[in-house]
Amino acid sequence: MPLHAPRSQRGKPAHETVLASPGRSASRLRNALSLAYESAGPKLIIYAVLDLVSGVVPVAVGWLTKMALDRLSGQAPAHTLMAVAVGLAAIGVVQGVVPHVITYLQGEVDRATGTLAQGRLFSAVTRFVGLGPFEDPTLLDKLRMAKQSGRTAPGMVVKGSLGVVRAGITISGFLASLIALAPLMAAFVLVFALPVLAAEIVLSRGRAHMLWRISPRERREMFFDHLLSDVDAAKEVRLFGTGSFLLGRMQDERRAADAERRRVDRHELAAQSLLALLAALVSGAGLVWAIHAARFGTLTLGDIAIFIVAVAGVQMSVAQLATNLAQAHQALVLFGHYQEVSTAGPDLERPERPPTLPALREGIELRGVWFRYSEDQPWILKGVDLMIPQGQSLALVGLNGAGKSTLVKLLCRFYDPTRGAILWDGVDIRDVDPDELRLRTSAVYQDFMHYDLTARENVALGDLTALDDQPRVTAAARRAGVHEKIADLPQGYDTLITRTFFGGTEEDTAETGVLFSGGQAQRLALARALVRERRDLLILDEPSSGLDAEAEYEIHTRIREFQRGRTSLLISHRLGSLRDADRIVVLSEGRIVEEGDHGALMAQGGAYARLFALQASGYTGELVPPSVEGAAL
Ligand SMILES: Nc1ncnc2c1ncn2[C@@H]1O[C@H](COP(=O)(O)OP(=O)(O)OP(=O)(O)O)[C@@H](O)[C@H]1O
């Protein structure tokens, strides 16, 4: 079952998924512990043994203290006093050293599990075939929590579970001591312990519930936080003076989330104060009884000492057990998000035994393709039939929002058509391995990426086999018209194209990283697509929108040469750059309304001709007939 909620359900808080059933908690506990064992086996075992042994220490201290007092007060033979003192001193050493060793081992276990968990989480995220999961708010919340908790939750589960067992050992030791001294008191303390545990579990569930409820607010807060500190947003924020407005929105989100946190904190304050009061009453009553019993000689001085230590020890350990239980429970809930994301099935069907995808021979066909982003959203493509023949260049023209980029996303299988099919030489692309499909495709997207990496890496990310192949990287950069610019940089292709961070070497200076202009960054993105040589399909979605006229002309000439004999799909609002395409297709409101080459479409005098004339008039200054001016696609 796909992890992300159907789009029709998006935005609904999934509270029911937050609180795990006992069965689910047990399976999460098993998985968290096995993750910790897998990543830090021997260290985990030593950590567990030391942690559990430290649960016996308070009981041993109680008994040794009783023995020392009984010997000192003459209520027991004094010849073993020195042995008791040595025992107490030895335990003091253990109490002094072991916690530090435990803290170190705990850190080691946390680091090892965190690294393994992070690897698994992001492997799962990169396994998503399409873009749908990244647009699903429920999944984004889970992912955010999984990212936070993947690093810490397994360690917290281990710590919490060990804490529960350790507290259990201490409680059992003290209860056994109390049973030996005063069985009624033992029963009294035990009966008191149960509601404390129950209350802590209820409180912990309430906190987990609250954390899930406020997570959309935290996500919005992070969004405003990003806007207020992001260099790209800084220009508009300053020019439009939106800083205080955005800050206000950010703080509104925080205040609303804080109100929820405060409500839960107050519940916890009230409940825990009540429990502490009850604890004080129980131990007070116990103390009165013990002193009374000592006056009548029923208890020795040592008995009173161990009695006081045992009552306090049981109460403290019950509180610790409850806290550890609550922590482990919270960690298990968070671990649940991690587990859900990291074990999520594919978002789009992957065929089990896909046939190998041969090189394109005939062409790619869109057959009756209908598409909408979700059931509650309008149709974007409405029955598109289109052939992209092998070896030909096809240009796609249309007004903003016509569906051009959507069609490109379907060709790359980022989404599946809602109806109809896309066929690669007659084979439905849903039946082939998406990775193979993408290996045969190259693209520059309208919203192209810039990586805060070196110039070489920015180009070679298009095909990692080119990372150490300078001639290929240079050839791609030349085709994209960015080679000269890179060659002039302080470290050439090894220059970081960012000022965000440096490479970490001692030679780093302020000159090490440089910033590229928008057009130069676009050329890098183009080089990245062009380094993917010998691909069957090249998609260029507005590849020159940020280029100056000279660069645009030059690059389109080079692209044309590069494209010759290749299958390509080109999208541009600058119609002049498309006129040499073998075929031009006009998309309007999700339907193909015209197609042909430039000459045929101009002769037809339809939407394309009107749009072309309108654009040309901007350059020639010729008047455009009213029919053209009012034209819409
Ligand atoms: N991820 C998405 N989820 C929901 N709707 C979307 C998504 N992406 C695009 N749309 C919608 O699909 C429609 C077509 O968008 P698309 O980007 O395909 O248009 P386009 O023809 O490429 O436009 P432009 O020329 O402005 O780039 C738009 O109305 C847009 O709002």
Image (cartoon, rainbow, N blue to C red):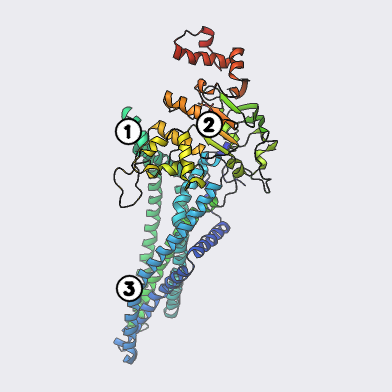
Q: Secondary structure at mark 3?
A: helix
**Label 3: which residue?**
96
Residue 452 seen in this snapshot: no
Q: Residue furthest front?
A: 471
Residue 112 seen in this snapshot: yes
Amino acid beneath label 1: Gly
Give the CA distance from mark 3 to mark 1. 52 Å
Q: Secondary structure at mark 1?
A: helix
Give the foreground label among 2 and 3.
Answer: 2
The location of residue 526, given as percent across then percent down, is 48, 35
**Around disc 3, counting alpha carbons within 10 Å, would you say few (fewer than 14), some (14 to 19), or many (20 or more)?**
few
In the rendered structure, are the residues bearing label 3 and label 1 in contact, judged by CB atoms less than 8 Å apart? Answer: no
Judge from the rendering whether residue 78 lies leftward or rightward of residue 612; answer left or right.
left
**Around disc 2, counting alpha carbons within 10 Å, would you say few (fewer than 14), some (14 to 19), or many (20 or more)?**
many
**Label 2: which residue?**
540
The location of residue 366, given as percent across then percent down, is 65, 31
Amino acid beneath label 3: Gly
Give the CA distance from mark 2 to mark 1. 36 Å
